[in-house]
Each structure stands twice: as structure tokens, then as C-alpha cells.
Image: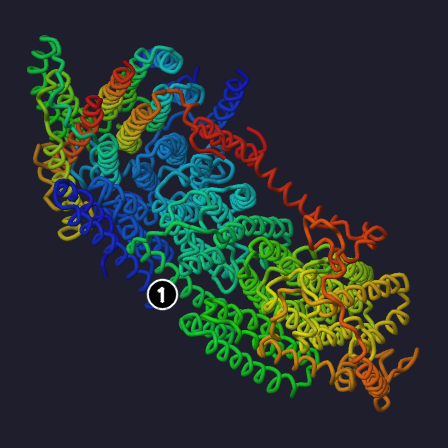
Amino acid sequence: MENITLQNISLAIGILVILIGLWGLLTQKNLIKIVIGFALFDTGIHIVMVSIGYIKNRTAPIIDSAVDMNNASNLVVDPIPQALVLTAIVIGLGITALMLSYVLKMYQKKKSLDITNYKDLKW
Amino acid sequence: MVGPIYIIAIALGTAFSLGFFKNANRNISFSLMFLAMAFLTFISGQWLYAFLTQQQETIQIFTAGFKPPFSISLQMGFHEAVFLTMINSLGLLSAIYLFDHLREKGVNMMMVFMLLFMGLNVVVMTRDIFNLFVFLEISSIALVGLIILEKKQDAISSGFKYLIASGVISGILLIGIVATYYYSGSLYINDLISANLSLVKGGSVAVFLIMIAVILELKPFPANGWALDVYQSVNAGIGPIISGGIATASLFILYKLLPIGGDAWLLPIGITGVISFLGSNFLGIKQKSSNRILAYSSISQVGLLMIIMSLSTSLGDKFEFVFFSVLISQYLAKAGLFWIAGIINKDEIDDWNILKKSPGLIVLVGIFMFTLLGLPPFPAFYGKWELIMNLSQSGNFVWVGIILLGSLFEAIYLLRWFGKILIKQDNLEDLKIKFHKLIPVIFVSFAILLFSYLTAKWSGLIGIKYYIPFIIALLIFAFDFLPVFIKNIAAISTVAWYSYVLIYQTYIPENDILRIVFGSIFLIGAIIMLIPGFTFKGKRQGFYPLVILMFSGLAGLIEARTTFQFFFAWEIMTLASYLLIIRGKNAVKPSFNYILFSMAGAFTMFAGFGLAFAETGSISLNALADVLVYANWAYALIAIGFLVKIAAFGVHIWLPSSYAEADDDVTSMISAILIKSGVFGLIILMLSMSLKNAVSPNIPYVLGWIGAIGALIGNMMAIYQEDVKKLIAYSSIGIMGYILFALSMMSHMGWLTAFTYSIVHFLYKGLLFLAIAGVIYRTQTRNIYEMGGLIKRMPLSFISVLIGIITLAGMPPLAGFAGKWMFYNAVIMKGWYLQGAIVFFSGIVAFLYCFKLIHNIFLGPLKDNHRKLKEASIWWLIPQFILIIGIMVISVYPKIVVEPIGQYLSMYFPNDGLVWDGTTASTRLGYWDATKIMTVFAGMFGVLFIILYSMSRKTQLVEQFNIVFQGERPERPETTHYAHNMYAPYNKALGFLTAPFITSAWKFVYESIHSISDQVRKFYTGNGQTYAMHIIIYVVVFYLFINGGF
Amino acid sequence: MLSIILALFLGILILVLAVMAVQNKNIVVAIIAAGAVSLFASILYLVLAAPDVAMTEAAIGSGLSTIIFFYVLNKIKRQNG
Amino acid sequence: MVKNSFIFLVLIGLAAILLNLFAGFNGSTELGTIAAHYASKGIEEVGSANLVTSVVVSYRGLDTLGEVTILFLSAAIIGFFLKVDNTDNKNRQLKYTSEILNTASQVLVPIMLLFGAYVFINGHLSPGGGFQGGAIIASGLVLMFIAQPKKEMGHKMINIVESVSGVSFVLLGVAGILFASGFLDNKILSLGKFGTLFSAGIIPIIYILVGLKVGSELTGIALSLKENQNEA
């Protein structure tokens, strides 16, 4: 029971979402679903990141009336992973949007959403 | 100085503000972007300058007003400055190159272009690992944008593959970064290095993820399919940005983060590099698309750089030298080739012969390719040398083998490509070259030349006098517009001056007979063989620089005191001779064989030198004598290099067609002179190594057999040739067999024979080729059966050939007999009777082709279309006379040559020498007096001549065509000619000896390599998903490899 | 303890939705499921004391990116028809 | 099927690696030195109540600059990629959405825009900030496009907002070098009274710029993808 802590659970969720996302990325033939898989992969990483910064029984890293300013370092969770996640989420959106625009353009050229039809170059 | 932080400010500010200009004149926005790129280059260049000249200290730049680890900091040190200067100047040049594309595509693409370089700059400078991640993402996203600069279908799908693959990689990197943060509490790279994360279990996995992601960013073989597709599909202007910008920055990331992994990571990175280097080069062999070849080559070079990086500790203070010489030459040359590919705008390398119309570009392509191959005098040569020496010294012989093998594969595809450029083809389209695309190409070629000079200076391996030939060659190249006549005079006088300095001023005073003999063959021979050049009309562009380089390489062999200098000169000579041969009309394929064999031979020689260095720790040629433990291997490996050059049996197949297809005067040069470089090398090698007991006597024994068989097969092949140049070429193989055999006897007489043969072969082979060339020049054919009766039209040539073949056949009274006489003495003394018998038999065979030469060309009825032929030009005849004089002098008075050589050899072989008494030379087996023989022969000849001359009045002229009585005109009239297929009957008896099984064997090897390469590359399925899969498999396998389990 | 149960509950939801997003043949359902994963992840972030991340994930992960997915899907469908 | 089971195996391998990665993971109990420094000195040094904000905008401000650059890049690439000439769009019959959505959007959009602005202006005091605010604004604008396709908000406007905010961000960073101790230094302005709107140096300004920039970039991306729908 000791191992079942909040951060362990969320970490496990994160890892599983990563794997599910990769599974989708690697097995689905539909371009849009591949992008979905990638988005899930990203989300999973974000969950892992946030769980790493969590500290049991602490509050959000915002110094307000509930948090004593002088003892803040013993009261709040780690702000750094959260800051990193913020950045990562936005980057992830940028990449997802780019992927989707590629999908759109690929579809316009070949009228197919099946990735196996896009082996234009090989070897 | 302008602070490095302004790089970010300027680049971002410009990119953001370009948004204001979306509807404005695109020239304005382009100028803004260009100015910004120029400023970036200026900032980094200025720092580099400060580091180089002013002992500038490495500085840290803090952002946000806090010190690290609390805030993100950047670092500007010497290495950063080098990398940034490389990246930014590439950006500037790329901007010039892509001028029309960027202008046409508009502001968005300009922003993307700028941001790519901005990202790379920060990636290089930052000391914060997450910041590195963010800016790496910027660069890769920007690249995704540039991929679709042209919205082609294949570019779009390869862009998607790239997105998926780089998405997966950056995901892995991100997990690694966060986990590293968890285990160390910091994102500051210096903290991570000192945190010793590898000690914690999870920490080591975190480090693993970071390192593997960085390695994957380098596109290691085989998890790199997406990158190859991108390379192939993008606009050629983007290629350099990937290989010279992104890959360079990624290498720097590896360099920067390597300390986090610690020394434990050196070996895995080295192995990754080895696999990439060998694998990519291997798969490159089968490629036909120029961009894809460049992609494979880029990846292989990155692999090589990874190897170098993994050796950073053992390379010690040589590391920077090796790393940067390879990195920068690859960076410059690759950019140049990509840009030229863009100018040509043809994907298939078969279409590259469009360049035929722009010889200037061909020269540039050559410079770039030879730079990539690490041939001298280009920078990577020095780096590779140090690398191989170091690897050998640390006992990594397998790695040496792999690197050399990989380099050979690379040579195969790059040189085959180079050959394709030179293939002649009619009605080629015109090449439209936009001026702005040419600027960067020319710029990098100058940068290569400058950097070559700097590396040579930095290396300290060669002295200033090694630059002189290059300067002369460049000078001649600069004055290439002058007519042949002037350039020929210049070339002759240069060589004459040099031989005066070298032989007369240096070696004659030192009485160094070996070097006097070979120096004279090389340089005085050069003067003689250059004389026919006067017959050529026009400009003969590019010929003279190459000739100068070839002879300087030969002279360099004579002068070399270290293995490095020797190898340097060897490669220069090989490269220049390759380029001379390839100038011939149909010489592309033969010259490819030549260079391929030569390079393979050079690489084994290289490995041999490495072995020697591993044992003695010295690169002095004299130190070869101290090699004991590795003696057999080193000896054999080095010898292979020389055997290739003398076309010893087994590696001879390059020779006949190369000789045949080269220009006529080039053939004389290579056959009479160049081939002796191998003999010289063997002598040097044997003098220092064979005489010690460390080398097993079996090796010379085997060499003796190779020589004997070579003599037989060469002569056998010669008799069946219809092509007169091939005939003489095969006879060269035979003679080289004699020489090899003689040398391998390791006795006084054997060596005396070899020396004498070398001189005599030089004389008569030059004579024969010159005379025949004169004939070919007049008759316009090389087929023997199309000649005949030329004695009437070309009597002087006839005399030359007559003297030539008498000497060749070793008949008294001419000098060839001296050689033969000594030869048999040597064989009998050594007791190699069986081999001796083979060689003796092959001597008889030689009579057959000698007869064929003189009879079928000069005797018999004159061909109808040859009735008006003139004697060969005076410029062909003058050198022949000189050579005849040489033959005569040696024939009459061999003592002047043989005695000093004998004295010299007595230092090494004190026993069983010739004893001279007046003009009589004797051994314990017999004696011989050339002068007397000559007198007697001259007397007999005089008598015979008078008799024959007096009878000649009575000869009856035969009607020319009365020999044919058939009623029908034969399908191929030449087959009825008696000279056609002359020795076919012998073929029935001895045909098995001339079956082309050596050729078939090599062909089999070559084709197997190709088909394996073709099969292996099939795992690049072209499916982006599979590529992503490769990445994950790579990660898992790598993990298993490192940890031996989960 | 309550937060652990909540997290477990969210976790199951997230995983089920994730599998749905990957495996469901209907792309519309898949996109919605993926958006829902983000939405529940943002609740998880709240539990993990990360309100900033939660807001971002909700706005970007489940909001905007779902919209973008639908834009693209819509466009593809229209081209098809 | 064989292929999928192989993929499954490989993913199991990856899972094993990730398990090893967190083998000893049981959650932190203490902040690391750097995080502790942020928690205890952050207010003094940066003056923002929201520690995430002080990390994002100040301590790791360069990351944020990079991040808006990424969005900027994506927007530029997508804009270029999906660019179509709108000539035949003019004649196209625009499809009107339902009355309810239309009315709702008229109410909702201003509220969302306001809320977004609120979120980024208060980023240093409460949860939220430039990204979140920007995303909310973008969502609002996108909602507006859905409801009223006719109400075109030109790329031009977006571009200008994007550029102005981006250039100002960089200029503020440079001002840090000139007037304080480094690029993106927060202390160009005084930190003010802790906990008030006008405090924490330039954080509010930067967050406004980030909000505008992210908002315009996201809108730009959405707009590009949407406009492309009109392509025949």
C-alpha cells in the first residue's frame, strides 16, 4: 500500500498513455489517427512531468494567503516541472497542428488517408 | 565586441518584424533577412577571431539577471565560436543560394529560414538542457517548413515522416530531461555533469534516454530512413542546411552532453559511429539519386565524427585537429556538392554529364569529392591519418579495418558518380546557371583550399616545400588559357629545374644510388615524356596542372622520409594519374577500375603504416625496420599497395584497359614511369623490412610466385591482343612480373636484375609506347590488323619499335640481354628452378608478341588508306631518339649503370655480386662482356646489312590484292587478314592460362557487394510508421546492448 | 486518500478513453476521446496541485487542438464528397 | 498481425526501460535546491506570487521566448503551406450556422476575450498567464468564426498583432541588457508592492505580450486550417 501514492498512480497513468499513444502511432494506418496517437504520446509525457514535480500534501506553487511566504519552500510543490510542461504543451500543439496541415495537404494530393500509400521515396 | 545574446535578439527581432512586411516588396524583406544573417555571421566570426588571436577567455552569458543554475545561461567558448561561425556562414551562403526561392515563396519562408539558424545558434550556446530541447524543436520545426519550400508530393510525405520521427525522438528526449531533473534537481548542464547520475539506477536510465535521443538526432544508421527521404526530396539548397547546419549542431550537442554520460558512453558512441559509417557507405553504393548519395555520405561522415568523438580521450591533444579537419572538410564539401546538385537540378547521377559543358564546375565537383574522400592535399586527409595512427596505436585494428573499408565503399560511389559526369554524350542540353547560385559554391571551394593550407600547417606533418607543386599547379591552372606550347615549356622547365635540385644537388652528392636511379626515371623520364605534348593543338585544359601534380607526387616518394610523407605523395600521384587517365576518350570505366584498385591498395598500405606505427611509435620510414611483432602483417599490407600499382598478378585487371584508353602521351608516362613507383615502394619496403629476420621468408616466396605467374599470364595475354596499346600494356604486366620475381629473390643478383630491368623497362617501354603512339596518331586506329607495311611510310618509327622489341625480348646485343643474363644467374643461385622455368617460358612467349608488333605493323603489304601517311611528328620522334641513345649506352657499356648499383646493393647483400674486370662482368656461374658482344654484333650486322642491301634490288614487288581469291566479299573483311587473331592456334593449347578468371573473380566480388547493398537497403520501406518503429527498436536494442538486459 | 481514489478513477477514465482514441474505427469518436483524455488529464493536474498546467491543458489540449482536428477532418470529408 | 505483435513486444521493451527509469520513484519529499531557491527567494527576486509564472517568464524566460517562436513558426509554416488564393471564395455560398450558436457566440465571444485578457494580466498573481489567456482568446475567436463565417478577421490584423507583440518581447529582453543585468531581466521596472496588479517588474507586460502573441498565433493557425476548407 505504501507504493500507492498519488504521484505513483499518475506516473503510471502517464507511462501507460505514452505507450498507448505510441501503439496508435505505430499501428494505425489512418493518418489522422496517427496524429491522435502522437498527441496522446505527448499528453502522456506531460502527465509524467507533472507527477514528477508533485510533493505529497503540498499546495500549488502560488504564494497567497494560504501559503506562508517565509516557509514557502516547505509548503508548495515543485514549480519547475510545471513551467516545463507549460512550454511542452504549447510546443506539442504547434507540432500537432503542423502534422495535421501535412495530413490535409497529403490528402489533397493523393486522396488517401492510408499511410502505406505514402512511400514516395524509399531505399 | 557584440555580445552573443544579440544573436538571439537580432534574429528573433528580425523574424518577428518581417511580419510587418508581408505585403511589402519582397526585396526589402529579403534584404532585412540577409542583413540579419550577415550580422549573425559577423558576431560569431568576431568571437572566433578573438579566440584565435587574442586569447579570449570563455565567457558565460546570464539571462534574466540571475546566475545559473537558477536561470538559463549561454556559453561562448572557442568550440562554440567555431561551430557558430560554421553554422552562420552556412546560413549566409544558403541565403544567397536560395535567394530566388525565398523571394518567390515570400516572407513566411524567410522567417522560417532565419529561425532555423537562430535555433541552432542557441542550441550550440545554451548550457540549459531544457532550453536546448526548446531551441532544437525550433530548428526541427523550421526544417519541416523548409522541406515544403517546393510543395512537391514526395517532399510533403517526407516532411510528414520527418515530423513523426522527430516527434518521437524529442518525446524521448523530453522524458529523459524530466527524469534527469528528478534525479539531479537541476537542468543546468554543468550540474548534471557533476551530479554523477550514472551511479543511481534511474539516473543512468535518464542519462540513457538523453544520450540516445541525441544520438538519434544524428540520424544513425539504420534508424534514419526519414532523414534520407528528406535529403532526397528537399530543394538542393536545403541539403547543406541539414548536413552542414543541423547535423553539425547535433554533433555539438553530443559533444556538450557527452560528459553527462561519462566515459562509459564513449564506446557505445564509437560503435554507433562505426555502424553508421560502414552501413551508410555500404548502402550508398547502389544509389542513383545524387541527393540521396549525398545523404548517405553525410550520415556516414557523421558516423566518422562520432568515432572520432568517442576517441577523444585517447586522441588527447590531437582530438581537436582530427575532429575539426574532418568536420570542416565534410561541411564545406557537402555544401558545395548539394549546391551544384541544385544548379544541375537533375536527380539521377546519370544525368550529371550535363556538366560537360561547364568544365569549371567539374573541377569544383572534383575538389568537393576528393575532399569528402579525404584525399590529399585536402584537410580530412591529415585528420584521417592521425585517426588511423591513433586507432592502431591503441590496438583497435578492427576499427581501422572498418573505417578503411567504409572509406572504400564511399570511394566506390563517389568516384563512380564522378566518372558519370565525364561520360561523353551528344546533344546535351545547356546548363542554365544563375549567378547567385554560383557564388556560394565558389566561396566554399576557396574555403576548402584555404583550409587545406591551414590544416597542413597545423598538422606539422609536412614541410613548406610540399605546397610548392600545388602552387605551381594552381598557377598553371590560372594560366590555363595559354596555348599548349607555352604551358608545355613551362611544365618541362619546372620538372627540369626540380630534377636538377633533387638529383644533381641532393642525391648525387649523397651518392644515394636508389634515389638517383628512381629519381632519374621519374623526373628525367618526365621531361622526355612531356616532349610529345608539343604536338597537341589548342589549350589542353587541365592537363598540365595534373601532370605537375603527378610528377610532384613521384618526386615526393623519392623525398619522403616519413610514412606520412610517403603516403601523401603516393595519394597525390595516384589521384593525379587517375585524373590524367580519365581524360581519355572512353576512359571513364577503365579509370574507375584503376582508382578503385589503387585506393584499395592505398588503404591496405595505410593500415600497414598504422601497424608499423602501433609498434614503433614513429612515422619515420627507417623505423619500419624496427617492426618486429606485427612485421608480417605490416609487410604484407604495405606490399599489397605496391603490388596494385605494379599490376601484379591478381590485381592486374585495371591495367590493360586503363593504358589502352588513356591519351597516348599519358600512356607513355604511366607505363614507363608511374608504374615504377610501385617498384620503388617495394624496394624501400624490402630494404627496411625483409632484410630483418622479423618478416617470414614465406612472404617473399609467395611474392616470387606471384611475379612468375604474372610474367607468364601477362605475356600470354599480350600475344592475343588486337589492340596494340593493350598488347604493350599486357607486356608491362609481364615485365613487372619479372621485376617482382627478381626482387623477391632477396639476393644481390636478383636485385641487380630488378634495378636494371626497371631502368631498361623505362627506356624501351617508353620507346615502344611513343613509337606506337606516333603510329596511332597517324593511322587513327589501334587495331593491329588494320596496320601493315608501315616501314615504308614511317621508317624511323620502325627503327624505334625494332630496338624496343629487341630490348624487350632480351636478345643480345641490346640492354635487355644484360638483364636476362643477370636474371638467370640470380635464379640459378637462388635455386628457384620451377619459378625460373615459368619465367623462362614466358620469355619465349614474349618473342611471339614482339614478332607480332614488328611484323604486322611495319612489314607486309601497306594498307590502301595508309599510302599517303607521313612519318610521325618530330615531337614524337625526339624522345624516342633520346631513349634509343639511352638503350645504346647501356647496351654498349652497361658497367656505368650496373656497377654503381652493385656497389650500392653490396651494402645490403654483400655476397654473390658481380665482379667487374674491365668491361667483363662475371659471377661464379659465368661471364659476359657487353662491349665485346656489341662489337661483334655490330660487325655481323654490318656485313648482313650490306649483303641484304645488295640483294634488295632483286626483290619482286607483289601485287597488293592478289591474296584474296574468294568470289564473295566477306562479312567482316578484316577477319580474312592474316594478322587478325594471329595466334589463335596457340589459344587451343594454352587457352586455359588466359581464361579471364581473375577478372571474373573481381567482377563477382564487385557485383555481390552491389546486390547485397541493394537487398539490405530494402528495409527502408518508405513508410513513416516503419521509420518511427526503427527508432523505437533502436532505443530498445541500444538499451539492451548497454545494460545487457532490462 | 480521497485524492488517490479520484486519481485512480481519473486514471481508468483516461486509459479507457486513450484506448478508444487509438482503436476506435470512427475518427470523430477518436478525436473526441482524445480531447476527453486531455480534459481528464487537466483535472488530474488540478489534483496534482498544478492549476496553471490544468488551465493550459484544458484550453489547448482539449479545446483548441480538438477544434483543429475537426477542422481538418471536416475539410477532408468535404473533399471526399 | 505478426507485425502488430512485434510492435507490441518492442513497446513492452520500451515500457521496461521506462519502468527502470522510475524504478526507485516514490515521489519527492523535498524541493531540490533550485526549486527551493525559487520558492523561498522567488518573491524577493522576481515578485510574482505565482511561482510558475516567475519561472516561466523570468528565470526561464528564454524558454518562453523560444516557445512563442515555435508557435510563430508553426503559424508561418501552416500559413504558407495552406495558402490559397481566395478568388473563388467570394462567390461561394456561405453556410450559416444555427441561430442558437450565433446568439450564443455573440454573448460568449466578448466574455471569452475578456476572460482571456484577465487571465494573462493576472498571470503573476493567480493561476494562468500568457499561454492560457492566449489560448482562451484564440478559442473565443475561433468560436466566432464558427458562428459567423462571414465575419472575416483578416490575417493582416493577426500578423500585425503577432509582429508587434513579438518584436516588443525581444525589445524588452534587450532592454534588460541595457537597463538591468541581462537579457530578459525582470528588474527593468521596480518589483512594486507584492501581490498587486502592477508588481513583479515586467512580468505583467511580458505576459500581456505573450498572451497577445499566443492568441494571434493560435488564431492564425486555426484560421489557416479553416480558410483552407474553402479551397475547392
Kind of residue indicated by mark 1: Leu
Chain letter belonging to callout 1: B
In-front residue for pair D168/B563: B563
The residue beneath circle 1 is B52
Question: Is residue B190 among what the camera can see?
Answer: no
Image coordinates for residue B44, horizontal then vertical, percent: 29, 57
**Residue B1006, relative to residue B563: is it above or below?**
above
Q: What residue do we see at 59% from left, 64% from top?
A: B780
Which quadrant would residue D201 be assigned to in this image? Answer: top left
**In the image, what residue occupies the spot 91% across and 67% down?**
B831
Disc 1, SS: helix
Q: Position of residue C29 (x, y in %)?
A: 31, 11
Q: Quadrant of residue A98?
A: top left
When the figure is inspected, residue B815 is found, relative to residue B853, above or below; the finding is below
Q: Position of residue B1045 (x, y in %)?
A: 58, 30
Q: Is residue A83 above or below residue C27?
A: below
- Which of these two is toward me, C29 or B34? B34
Q: Is residue B164 above or below residue C72?
A: below
Q: How many marks?
A: 1
The answer to whether residue B956 is seen in the rendering is: yes
In terms of depth relative to the viewer, which is nearer, B518 or C54?
A: B518
Judge the density around disc 1: few (<14), some (14-19), many (≥20) Cα neighbours within 10 Å. few
